[in-house]
Amino acid sequence: MGIKVFFIYPNTFGMNMLPPAIALFSAILKKRGHKTEIFDTTYYSVDHDMDSDGRKMEKLQIVPYNMAKRGIRLKTSDWKKDVKEKIRKFEPDLIALSVTEDMWNLGVKILHEIKDYKKEKNIPVIAGGVFSTFAPEIVSKEELVDLACVGEGENALIDLCDKIQNNEDYTSLTNCWIKKDGKVIKKNTISNPVDVNQNPILDIGLFERNRLYRPMGGTVYKMFPVETIRGCPFKCRYCNSPDQERLYKQQTGASFFRKKRMDLVSKELKHFKEDLGVEYLYFWADTFLAMNKKEFEEFCDVYSEIKLPFWIETRPETVNDYNIKKLSEVGLDRISFGVEHGNEKFRREVLDRRWKNEEIIKSLKVPHKYGVKFSVNNITGFPYETKKLAFDSIELNRHIESDNQNIFTFVPFHGTPLRKTCEDLGLIKPETVTTCVTTDDTQINMPQYPPHEIKEVIRTFNLYVKFPKNRWKEIERAEKEDDEGNRIYKNLKEEFLEKYMPKPNANPRGDLGDFDFHSKSNVDLSKSAHQDEMA
């Protein structure tokens, strides 16, 4: 018969695209006879760091777009009532909370809305995701969490569901910290990394239809995530990949970094295109071009049959004329490059990024040769940084003809080497839960680079990058959020949008007007189609 698993995905409007991990877990569980449902807060007004894409648009970091043109808007119902109604209707045997650190507090808020039902029915709650992996001590302290998953969740979730179905004890469940009577009683070790080639195609039908749409280059597409690589071979100190690799090496002796077979990628791509009508594909590898030549050629052969635009994220040092030319010929539309900082010494010694500026500039001349658009991602507010050092990032970006450039406030997430640095410097307490990368506010207060200076750099970053230097005094005044500064900033912003903001991509299928993707009939049709497919 199987059991029923109720996923909770705390998220805010414009924050993340459809979560591929939950879509994968759902597919795995359904294949084994279990049933799944989800409560996703993305299109609810949850009063928790709203509309990150909207803030990027406000800060001139992305091409303006309009979700409403494709019928996508916030729900008008009360999320608190909806989650209670949904969970009582579904009657789950297990609640699974998938959460990032910046959404942890929202996740806890959702759990507390359904705590009466959880306690009444004695339903266990498992929390997973990167935050649970790297801060199980914090996750386990939450009274409503019974298991904290450390590491990958596929096998742990399969085994947990089987044990619940068979009414068996699960205190020895791999990859999990187990609680009893409010206290952690076991900290089980991690099992070997999952064989990603054994995983089924994502269960897209779990989600309501509007979750499939995301902006890219100013156009809202029906966009699906595709996994080619899990993990990353690089050691950037602001990222959790080094600690993820270390965790798995220490406990299993195996590398966390794996690649998916291209024949399986091909099967998934064809399913998305032919069965689900995808318009744009999003490859969610941290470093897409971490491939050898054989793997790269296989990908190009596979994708030559798909003929849809796609996005990748990679590093400047992985780019050359050959691979960008070849990718452009099969549909590469846009790349995001992580540059992060413009000072070579700082980038090398603090971030463990070792490429020289001259090489970055040269490498990033390649995409436009082949009609590929790209953005450059930057971060400021690192430990040891100063406002003067931040201007080195501005100078570097001025030498790169990117279509868009972003800058974010550094966030010392748990599980990143720089988190430990911040703790050692007394800039943050180990128990502090960090907030989202798209806010301007920093959670570390450094005398050499105080919070108000970080906000000033982020507010005017794109203006400094694009306007000529004879306008810099004007931009400097616009850093200040007073009446005069706001007036100047407003005028500069309008000029920036007119002169420097790229035009949106052509809409792939035309506007869908006011079609209501939230209507009950539409959601039911989507689910019926999925059930037919799974049958």
Image (cartoon, rainbow, N blue to C red):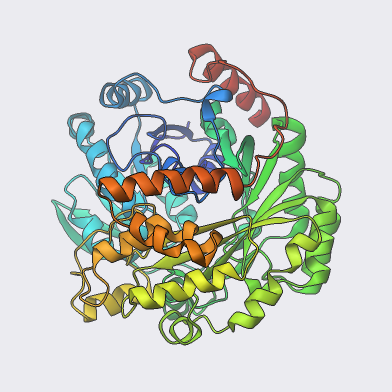
**Residue placed farthest to the top in the image?**
521
Question: Is 467 situated left or right of 328 in this image?
Answer: left
Q: Do we see residue 341 in this rendering?
A: no
173 displayed left or right of 373: left
- Let me know if residue 292 appears in the view: yes
Q: Is residue 461 above or below residue 499?
A: below
Q: Nearer the viewer, residue 420 or 387?
A: 387
Q: Residue at x 39, y 68 (%)?
A: 380
Residue found at x 50% / y 51%: 61
Taking 383 as reference, is 245 left or right?
right
- Residue appearing at x 48%, y 72% in the figure: 393
Which residue is more in the foreground, 373 or 36? 373
- Check the picture and name the quadrant holding the C terminus: top right
**Residue occupying the point 48% across, 31% down:** 1
Q: Is residue 514 above or below residue 102?
A: above
- Residue found at the far front of this picture: 470
Q: Position of residue 491 (x, y in %)?
A: 44, 44
Q: Position of residue 94 (x, y in %)?
A: 34, 39
Q: At which x and y percent is residue 285?
A: 60, 60
Residue 196, by quadrant, is bottom right
Task: Using the image, determine if residue 506 lies above or below residue 301.
Answer: above
Q: How many marks?
A: 0
